[in-house]
């Protein structure tokens, strides 16, 4: 019965599962069981794999894999893809400063090395845990129903909502939520311009 419901409501199942997996530890933190809120960025990837496994099987996994390994795009799109995230982070920092927030502390070389090491140990802790779900699965499903801009805005709102507990727990500023919507729309545009590459 659950399988047939998920089959009829794939997107709803995906978003509910993405939120639930990511924030599974939030109630435990709220009741004092955990010392800090547990945030699992791999929720969207887990949700996509579960929903694909239930509804599509191997053809769905092959389609997701094809979107994740589509490397052959023009060099100008690589420049955009690699330059866009740092530019958006810089813009968010400037907007935070304009809104009166304190300037963010720059990480030390040791801190940057630690972050890089943590990424090597847990690659699903960053974009690799998010993008296959948002871009590789949800965006194509949304665009099968709506126009690309409407799909991008809807996805931006849902991704921003996924980040809201970070605002509530003080780990992300409200400007970060606004920039999340902007980044999602820009990534959706990049996805479409590169023939569906979720890299």
Image (cartoon, rainbow, N blue to C red):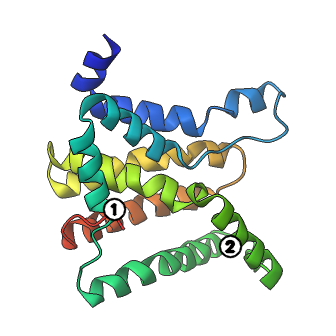
- Residue 72 seen: yes
- Give SS at disc 1: helix
Nearest to the observer: residue 35 or residue 98: 35
| Residue furthest front in the image | 58
What label does residue 68 carry, if any?
A: 1
Q: Residues within 10 Å of mark 1 (few under 14, many from 20)?
A: some
The residue depicted at 40 percent of the width and 64 percent of the height is 182
Q: Above or below — where is 81 with respect to 196?
A: below
- Residue 103 seen: no
What label does residue 124 carry, if any?
A: none
Q: Above or below — where is 63 with respect to 48?
A: below
Tell me residue 71's x, y (percent): 29, 75
Picture quadrant where residue 9 is located: top left
Q: What residue sits right under mark 2 in the picture? A: 116
- Give SS at disc 2: helix
Q: Above or below — where is 19 with respect to 172?
A: above
Q: Is residue 64 left or right of residue 144?
A: right
The residue depicted at 34 percent of the width and 15 percent of the height is 2
Q: CA distance from mark 2 to mark 1?
A: 22 Å
The quadrant of the picture occupied by the N terminus is top left
């Amino acid at each position: 019965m659950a399988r047939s419901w998920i089959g009829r409501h794939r997107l709803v199942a995906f978003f509910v599962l993405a939120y639930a997996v990511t924030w599974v530890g939030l109630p435990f933190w709220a009741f004092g069981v955990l010392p800090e809120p547990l945030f699992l960025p791999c929720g969207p990837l887990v949700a996509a794999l579960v929903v694909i496994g239930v509804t599509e099987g191997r053809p769905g996994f092959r389609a997701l894999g094809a979107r994740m390994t589509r490397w052959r795009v023009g060099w100008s799109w690589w420049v955009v893809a690699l330059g866009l995230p740092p530019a958006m982070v810089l813009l968010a920092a400037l907007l935070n400063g304009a809104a009166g927030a304190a300037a963010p502390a720059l990480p030390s070389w040791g801190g940057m090395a630690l972050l890089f090491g943590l990424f090597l140990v847990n690659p699903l802790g960053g974009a690799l845990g998010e993008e296959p779900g948002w871009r590789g699965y949800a965006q194509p499903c949304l665009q099968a129903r709506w126009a690309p801009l409407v799909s991008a805005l809807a996805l931006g709102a849902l991704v921003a909502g996924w980040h809201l507990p970070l605002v509530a727990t003080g780990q992300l500023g409200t400007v970060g939520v606004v920039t999340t919507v902007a980044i999602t729309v820009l990534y959706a545009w990049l996805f479409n311009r590169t023939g569906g590459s979720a890299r």
